[in-house]
Image (spheres, helix red, strand yellow):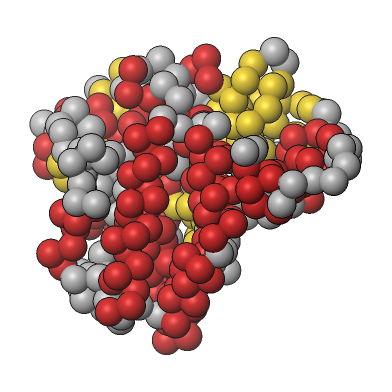
Amino acid sequence: MQYVEFYKLKNDGSQEVIATCGMKDGVVVCEGDEALIENLAKDGILDYSQAPPQKIFSKDGPRFLEQLKYNFKSGYLNASEIKEK
Amino acid sequence: MKFVERAFGSPKRELPKEETEKRKNPLSSAEEEILEMREKASSKDIIGGCSSRPVFVEFKDDGAGIFKLSSREEKLEHVGNYKKERAAYLADRFLGFGLVPPTVIREIDGEIGSVQEFVPDAKTAAEAYLTPAEGKEPTLTKEQKQSLKSELFKLWFFDYLLYNGDRHGGNLLVKENKIYAIDNGWTFRKNDFYWPFCRFFDTPIPQEVKDAFERFYSWKEGKEILRDLLSELLDKDEVDCFFKRVEVVERFVRQGTIPENAQSALKFDPGIIEK
């Protein structure tokens, strides 16, 4: 299964996984930090492969997973590359 | 004439280097000095987040920062983004908004990049309930909402001036009703697109924002110094576009609102903009 992890930066510079988004039966399902999951569902993310960027949501499937790492890259909250398990 | 002379008159004596630097940027702060001068105590690679992969750096005798390395700007459109981090901080500092954490450019372990002061105990907007989801009750008090609305307006106004193409919940921080604008690498754009976190078109500009902007706008020397500082970091076109936007926005500030149709007013090529 393909999935992406969200890493939250702590005050000592370590990171912890606070949420994951993964493909389940063809749709993206996110679990973990409640506010983050709700905001992802409500606000979506930007698809930077389009110019200008477009809003995409979990219904967009693999494209949504692929774009997470471009949206969450500040260091404070980063999304991983797509992983397999 | 050198800009130091233009801003402060011809010096009668040779100034010591530190004094010259101070006059070069009269708003440079103690926090910047810490970020610039303190030795690294430790560093950790931050995992995730496409190719830029910033580093968490702790400094001797306190302080920490997010270090974005020039060498990790792999994509063509990301080249020079670390300089824009500093440029956005400078613009914020001169505008007096207090949105961008202190940011400098320095070398650490032989690598050049931007170092931005780390904001401890902050959440990204993506982890915070700034607006309630459909069917959910708001979790903020009226006072908290008012305070955040004022901060978000300032952020929108700032991103409008800098024509930021990349402001979303992942690159702004919230801490105790204060907003911090981070990840400012896609600012100072010229004529492509602008992407704010929220929009306040046709909303009266808060007095605090008007006052700060008018203070900056009427500070002739300050604008000249900022232009010189930005010119060390950005292309001439990018700097020209910013100052053209300042002129456009000044008209809106006098009117009291930025109208909805003004979005395109900032989208220009400096070569063809109406003089």
- Which sits in the foreground, B189 or A23? B189
Which residue shows up at 16% across the image and 54% down it? Answer: B264
Left/right placement of residue B135 relative to residue B104 reads left
**Residue B252, quarter of picture:** bottom left
- Percent coordinates x, y for residue B99 in the rendering: 53, 58
Q: Position of residue B80 (x, y in %)?
A: 45, 25
Q: Say whether residue A57 is left or right of residue B64.
A: left
Residue B71 pos. (x, y %): 52, 14
Which part of the image, by quadrant, shows the C terminus of chain A? top left
Vertical side of B152 occupied by A3: above or below: above
User: Residue drawn at (69%, 45%), measured in percent from left and top?
Assistant: B5
Quick check: can you spot residue B78? yes
Does B173 appear above or below A10?
Answer: below
The answer to which of B179 and B214 lies nearer the viewer is B214
Q: Is residue A30 visible?
A: no
Residue B240 % position (x, y): 37, 42
> A30 left or right of B29?
left
Instruction: Name the residue: 83% across, 28% down.
Output: B39
Question: In the picture, residue B269 is in which quadrant?
Answer: top left
Looking at the image, residue B152 lies above or below residue B17: below
Residue B218 falls left or right of residue B65? left
Name the residue at 26% across, 65% down. B199
